[in-house]
Image (spheres, rainbow, N blue to C red):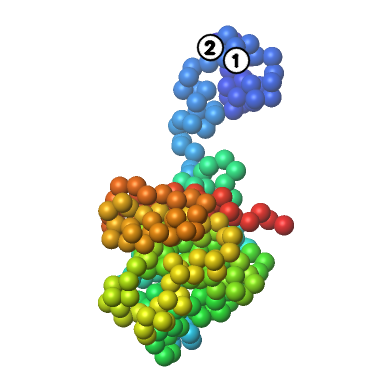
């Protein structure tokens, strides 16, 4: 090889990148391994951002107990003022059950132009994310305590409020209810993602969950009966065609006309949820607020 070509390769392809007078023939003379190594795609692999999961225990006055507070960061880079999406678990679940969310978040961050954000999850019990028993109010925890916890950790942007909410099953019901409450407070969300939300068509079915005092209590909070209270927040809804909540989801989609509606083969299973999480993360990522 000519001295000119060797210098171009050993200088991390500096001559090529800078537009120096290397002909295409000269570049082809450089062994492929040297070129790829110089470009950072061979030899020592270019490290990819890895998500960071932090699990803490905090005292919730609204729930009158210690709960798990789980934060999924997109990587180990700067976390101060990082926008946050609240993630609500399903019935009998906990904040620790963020299956496949870290890997889906990491993949989303690799896309060109992706804006960084984090997920935060808390334990909400089984009462469909509202107060059903005395001294246990999950919705008050979300509205009043989560902002303080975010502020203590330097998360949530300047207002320390989640910009979005996502939920699965019972958490999907809770996400829609939380979006309504935020709008009522005059602090609307920028995105809502509901995966297989537990939307039932009869009090007989909902009564089995022991989550509401009576049919009137349920009707007052049921997303299907209060679609107008969501306003125009961008909605994403996913449900498997074999899911036992499919009838309620179809009705909600027809009435709410979400920005993204997806009904694909699958049931109310972990396998289906994990398949949908990357789509959910991508949808949320499109609504991350820009830094001011």
The residue shown at (48%, 85%) is 62
Circle 2 is placed at which residue position? Answer: 29
Circle 1 is placed at which residue position? Answer: 5
Q: Is residue 215 above or below residue 284?
A: below
Where does the image place residue 231, in percent across and percent down from the top left? 58, 64
Q: Quadrant of the N terminus?
A: top right
CA separation, marks 2 and 1? 8 Å
Left or right: 211 in relation to 5: left
The residue shown at (64%, 21%) is 16
Q: Is residue 130 above or below residue 237?
A: below
Where does the image place residue 38, in percent across and percent down from the top left? 54, 28
Residue 204 showing in the rendered view? yes
Earlier sequence position, callout 2 versus callout 1: 1
Where does the image place residue 47, in percent across and percent down from the top left? 48, 43
10 Å crowding of disc 2: few (<14), some (14-19), many (20+): few
10 Å crowding of disc 1: few (<14), some (14-19), many (20+): many
The residue shown at (32%, 71%) is 202
Where does the image place residue 69, in percent across and percent down from the top left? 45, 72
Quarter where residue 182 is shown: bottom right
Q: Is residue 93 above or below residue 108?
A: below
**Viewer-proximal residue, 281 or 3?**
281
* Secondary structure beneath label 1: helix
**Viewer-proximal residue, 290 or 276?**
276
Residue 72 showing in the rendered view? no
* Secondary structure beneath label 2: helix
**Viewer-proximal residue, 289 or 262?**
262
Contact (CB < 8 A) between labels 2 and 1? yes
Q: Is residue 2 above or below residue 106?
A: above
**Viewer-proximal residue, 90 or 13?**
90
Left or right: 272 in relation to 191: left
The residue shown at (58%, 17%) is 6
């Amino acid at each position: 090889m000519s001295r000119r070509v060797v210098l171009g390769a050993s200088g991390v392809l500096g001559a090529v990148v800078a537009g120096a007078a290397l002909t295409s023939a000269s570049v082809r003379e450089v062994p492929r391994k040297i070129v790829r190594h110089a470009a950072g795609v061979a030899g020592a692999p270019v490290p990819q951002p890895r998500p960071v999961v932090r699990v803490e225990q905090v005292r919730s006055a609204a729930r009158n107990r210690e709960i798990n507070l789980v934060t999924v960061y997109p990587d180990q880079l700067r976390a101060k003022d990082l926008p946050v999406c609240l993630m609500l678990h399903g019935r009998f679940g906990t904040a620790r059950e963020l299956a496949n969310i870290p890997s889906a978040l990491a993949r989303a961050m690799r896309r060109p132009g992706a804006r960084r954000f984090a997920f935060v999850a808390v334990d909400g019990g089984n009462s469909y994310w509202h107060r059903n028993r005395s001294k246990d109010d999950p919705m008050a925890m979300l509205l009043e305590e989560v902002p303080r916890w975010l502020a203590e950790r330097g998360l949530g942007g300047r207002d320390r409020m989640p910009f979005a909410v996502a939920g699965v099953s019972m958490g999907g019901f809770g996400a829609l209810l939380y979006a309504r409450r935020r709008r009522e407070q005059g602090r609307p969300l920028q995105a809502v993602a509901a995966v297989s939300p537990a939307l039932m068509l009869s009090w007989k079915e909902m009564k089995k969950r022991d989550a509401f005092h009576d049919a009137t209590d349920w009707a007052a909070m049921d997303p299907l009966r209060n679609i107008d209270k969501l306003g125009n927040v961008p909605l994403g809804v996913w449900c498997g065609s074999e899911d036992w909540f499919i009838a309620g989801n179809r009705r909600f989609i027809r009435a709410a006309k979400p920005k993204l509606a997806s009904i694909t083969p699958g049931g109310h299973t972990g396998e289906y949820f994990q398949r949908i999480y990357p789509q959910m993360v991508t949808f949320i990522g499109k609504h991350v607020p820009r830094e001011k």
